[in-house]
Image (cartoon, coloured by chain):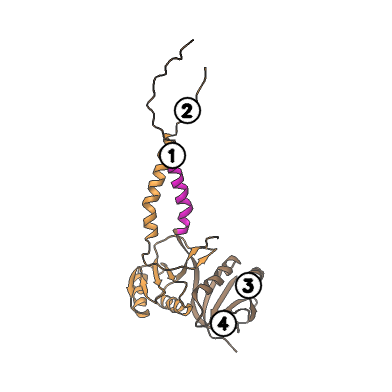
Amino acid sequence: MKHTVDIDILPMAAVGLILVLIMMVISPLVVSQNSTPVTLPQTHTSERKVENDINITYTQAGALLVNDEPVRDLDELGAALERELVSDPYLLIVVRADTACLHSGVLDILSAAKAAGALRIACATKRFREG
Amino acid sequence: MRRRPVEPRRNELILTSLVDIALSLVIGFMVAMPLFFETGIFVSAPGVARVGKSEPGSDIKANVFIANSGSILLNESPVSFENLQDLLPKLLDRSVERRVVVATDDSVRYERVMRVLDIAKQSGAADLALLRRRRVR
């Protein structure tokens, strides 16, 4: 008599589908973390972990945004950062500057962050894609 | 001639194609996710310093200067990006603090600076400091 071996793949299918659902739910949250599009520099190294941080976006046009809220100038940026840093000075300040920006502009932002009392500053990058 | 006994028909779902699609989606997401994530490099807040005139001390310094013209100076010696990738690890291996100080001219593009910071990190730098330039002639 010929035996047929039936593998029960239903649990695997269930697990796979649950994983797909979880990723589909999580990915928009990750991608829409910052809605202001900037071309970030690509690097081979990365240190930053995902945490509750303050994002400063510096666009190619020179616009400044703190957590996607536009600010007029560096003074307003400093004031906004001070408000955030009062509760926790160890909050990570992430500078998302466009690759086409001048570095001196980024230095101005870093100086403002330092003056506002920031203790941890990182420059946002994207993982280098080969090819 | 013997007739085969007719097997009772089993009502089973054909899940193979479903599993294939689900697993392909999972793999696709897993490959694509790191590209969506933003990473970052920690830097020390900028200050004004006199690049080229380092403080006397026993530790080996790695001062990188990027000029408007695009030239890079490592401890006042002109180097290319490729040379920097070779020289920085050797320099940092002998350094205790493993600190790289990057100073720039006013009109240097951010991308170029980040490329140098990336090379420094790959070379094993523990601390990256950004400075405004006030170079000693």
Of circles 2 and 3, the one toward us is 2
Do marks 2 and 3 share a subunit? no
| Chain depicted in brown | B
Of the pair A88 and A3, the residue shown nearer to us: A3
The magenta stretch is: B17-35
Q: Residue furthest front?
A: B1
Label placed on residue A6: 2
How many residues crowd mark 4 within 10 Å: few (<14), some (14–19), many (20+)? few
Q: Secondary structure at mark 4?
A: loop
Q: Which residue is mark 4?
A: B69
| Chain depicted in orange | A
Of circles 1 and 3, the one toward us is 1
Q: Chain of mark 2?
A: A
Q: Chain of mark 1?
A: B
State the predominant SS element of the stretch in magenta. Answer: helix
Marks 1,3: beta carbons within 8 A: no
Q: Is residue B64 visible?
A: yes
Q: Amino acid at mark 4?
A: Ser
Considering only vertical position in the picture, is A52 above or below B68? above
Q: Which residue is mark 3?
A: B84
Do marks 4 and 2 share a subunit? no
What whole-number distance in Å separates the C-alpha atoms at marks 3 and 4?
A: 17 Å
Q: Amino acid at mark 3?
A: Leu
How many residues crowd mark 1 within 10 Å: few (<14), some (14–19), many (20+)? some
